[in-house]
Amino acid sequence: MSYEQQLDATFAALADPTRRAILSRLATGEASVQELAEPFAMSQPAISKHLKVLERAGLIRRGRDAQRRPARIEARALQEANGWIERYRALWEANYARLDDLLDELKTQKKD
């Protein structure tokens, strides 16, 4: 999967509040589908569909433990998305700093 495709999959997966809540839960440790379904008013198959989206995006990994398939969070895809966001945050911060400088200059000129 290319970098752009990975970002698309990551942001598409993160667009859903249920999937974000699942990731928040998995940030505390691995969990089964049953454990992940508990706080939601949805079936285990519906949670499994969300897990498949997260897995395809590389945000989680599912293991095998006898009958159980625990899910755990994977940091790499989130790190890549964060890196992309940080580049734009730096751009906007630089723009705001220039705007602050301009406003300060205008205030100084107005006082004089």
Image (cartoon, rainbow, N blue to C red):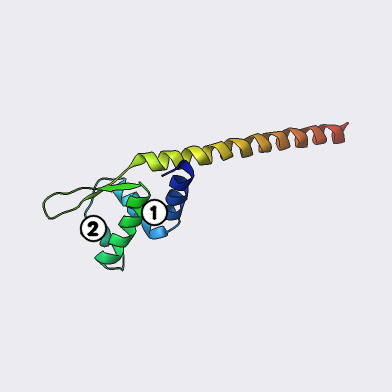
- Residue at left 80%, top 32%? 105
Report the quarter where the N terminus lies: top left
For label 1, the SS is helix
Viewer-proximal residue, 17 or 106?
Answer: 17
Q: Mark number for residue 20?
A: 1
Residue at the outermost left position: 66
For label 2, the SS is helix
Is 28 left, or right, of 102 in this rendering?
left
**Relative image position of residue 4 (x, y in whole percent):** 49, 44
**Relative image position of residue 86 (x, y in whole percent):** 52, 37
Q: Is residue 46 above or below residue 79?
A: below
Crowding around mark 1 (Cα neighbors within 10 Å: few <14, some 14 to 19, many 20+) is: some
Residue type beneath disc 1: Arg
Q: Is residue 47 above or below residue 70?
A: below
Residue type beneath disc 2: Val
- Residue at left 47%, top 40%? 82
Viewer-proximal residue, 55 or 102?
Answer: 55
